[in-house]
Image: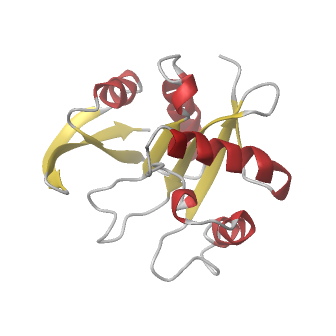
Amino acid sequence: MNIKLIRPTAELKKQAIDFRQEFFDHDEMIINGSELLDKTDDYDEWLKAVIANTNIETVNPNWVVTDTFFAVDETNRIIGIIDLRHTLNDFLEDLGNCGYSVRPSERRKGYATEMLRQLIKIAASVGMNELHLSVERDNEPSVRTIKYNGGIYERSFKFEGEDADIYKIAL
């Protein structure tokens, strides 16, 4: 699998907007792991927030230090997005340390599994000991991705009326 995780940049603006639009074109209004890329129309403002959130001194006071990465192929086409939340606050307790999405046209090709595999290495390199990931129980592809990367069931909860589970990955 020839993808790499890279940080968002101004140069990726057009690709990021195209990436986001593909979700909307498939009637998907939520892009997990995107630090609200799905909720903003201004890529430059989103990028400023993403950069600020990487540093304890500049992180949004309502958020936690977070690294966000685009998964790109050899042509720099954005295949997916994934984030790493270094800590969990009360809001994130049931959402976990990581969210991710693969663009609709690239699903079922193993990209999410590879993205998470690469993120696990990054998490370990910054001194994290474990990752907690949440997944709606009926999202079988994501459950498989998490389990393939060593996820062990930890607990269940309700999210917006849906059954969801938390998995833990030891690093």
Pick the residue in front: 66 or 32: 32
Q: Is residue 74 left or right of residue 82?
A: right
Image quarter where the N terminus lies is: top right
Q: Nearer the viewer, residue 43 or 25?
A: 25
Q: Residue 13: image x %, image y %?
A: 78, 53
Colouring style: secondary structure
- Quarter of the figure with residue 140: top left
- Up-down relation of residue 59 to residue 24 (above or below): below
Is 153 positioned to the left or the right of 73 in the image? left
Q: Position of residue 50 (x, y in %)?
A: 64, 65
Position of 133 relative to 34 (above/below): above
**Depth order, front residue of 128/72:** 72
Residue in view at x 82 percent, y 58 percent: 10
Q: Nearer the viewer, residue 121 or 116?
A: 116
- Count of all numbered marks drawn on residues in the image: 0
Give the quadrant of the C terminus: top left
127 lies above or below 1: below
Q: Is residue 140 left or right of residue 25?
A: left
User: Residue at the location (32% across, 55% down)?
Assistant: 95
Who's the residue at 60% across and 56% down the image?
67
Rendering coords of residue 130 (x, y %) = 39, 46
Residue 55, quarter of the rendered image: bottom right
Q: Residue 84 in the image: x percent, y percent?
A: 52, 52
Which residue appears at 68% of the width and 68% of the height?
Answer: 42
Quarter of the view holding residue 73: top right
Specify whether 74 is left or right of 122: right
